[in-house]
Image (tube, rainbow, N blue to C red):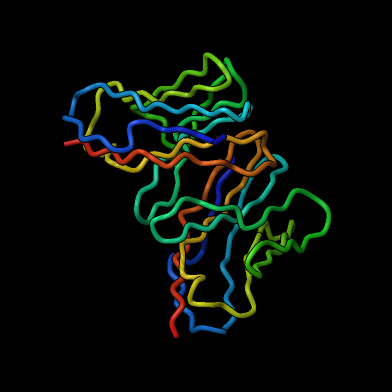
């Protein structure tokens, strides 16, 4: 089934540890996004990529990094996790700016 | 820079009553506008989008939205809600990146 795969589904992480959230899509979409969803704050954009080889900062990029080595993969790395990064993380993709977003099923991350 | 403001965080409404969810945006470039819905314990689904043309856009489940360029608004409406419309609704704006508002929780009561 075509779509977006995120891994892991959930993770408990000790503060200070490094963590990479994986995201893979098989729809050959150009644009990919990482959001975090927190109660009362909606979805906030962390980083985005409009095409392979390019990335950009969203609204809350601090403490996160991304790479886009190819069209399909868009991993999100927390270099040194902090408790404020406890959240649900969604990866999404679209064909372009005016097109519908397709979402992954999310990663529930708890930083203790 | 672009931003999205949803003016109501919570909207309680009785079944069969109308509902309006307000969304204002700001952007220095032309944008596309969207409304997404998230039902309890589910992912986000696209309700409708505005790209260009007619300022009144019809979406799924009886929802519609009106784009007002002078007021930089994209308010969502439904003339008669059902219990099943209980959900969180997100307005979003897209140019070179896609940003969401903080969401409006709609609770429909019998």
In the image, taking residue B44 as reference, residue B18 lies left or right, namely right
Q: Give B69 or A26, whichever is nearer the viewer.
A: A26
Residue at point 63%, 71% (across, down): B77
Work out which residue is located at the far front of the displayed protein and give it: A1
The residue lying furthest to the right in this view is B53
- Give the percent coordinates (x, y) of residue B75: 63, 64
Seen from the viewer's position, the closer of residues A60 and A72 is A72
Residue B29 appears at what percent x and percent y?
70, 39
Q: Quadrant of residue A31?
A: top right
Q: Quadrant of the C terminus of chain B?
A: bottom left
Q: Quadrant of residue A96?
A: top right
Q: Is residue A27 left or right of residue B50?
A: left
Residue A110, picture quadrant = top left
- Residue A82 at x, y percent in the picture: 23, 32
| Depth check, front residue: B21 or A25 | A25
Q: Is residue B17 above or below residue B66?
A: below
Q: Is residue A57 above or below residue B32?
A: above
Residue at left offset 25%, top offset 35% = A11
Q: Measuring 65% from the left and 60% from the top, which residue is drawn there?
A: B74
> Closest to the observer: A77 or B62?
B62
Q: Is residue A111 above or below residue B58?
A: above
Q: Quadrant of the N terminus of chain B?
A: top right
Marker count (numbered): 0
Residue B94 x, y percent position in the rendering: 63, 42
Left or right: A20 with respect to B73? left
């Amino acid at each position: 089934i075509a779509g977006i795969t995120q891994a892991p589904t959930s993770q408990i992480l000790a503060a200070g540890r490094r963590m990479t959230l994986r995201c893979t899509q098989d729809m050959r979409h150009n644009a990919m996004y990482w959001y975090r969803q927190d109660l009362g704050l909606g979805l906030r954009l962390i980083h985005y990529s409009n095409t392979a080889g390019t990335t950009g900062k969203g609204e809350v990029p601090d403490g996160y990094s991304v790479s886009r080595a190819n069209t399909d993969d868009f991993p999100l790395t927390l270099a040194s996790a902090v408790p404020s990064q406890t959240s649900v993380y969604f990866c999404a993709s679209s064909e372009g700016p005016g097109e519908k977003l397709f979402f992954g099923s999310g990663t529930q991350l708890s930083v203790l | 820079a672009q931003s999205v403001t949803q003016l109501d965080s919570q909207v309680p409404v009785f079944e069969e009553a109308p509902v309006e969810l307000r969304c204002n945006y700001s952007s220095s470039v032309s944008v596309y506008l969207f409304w997404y819905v998230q039902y309890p314990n589910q992912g986000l689904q696209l309700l409708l989008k505005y790209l260009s043309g007619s300022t009144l856009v019809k979406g799924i489940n009886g929802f519609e939205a009106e784009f007002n360029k002078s007021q930089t608004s994209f308010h969502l409406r439904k003339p008669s809600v059902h219990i099943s419309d209980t959900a969180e609704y997100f307005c979003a704006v897209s140019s070179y990146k896609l940003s969401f508002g903080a969401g409006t929780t709609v609770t429909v009561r019998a």
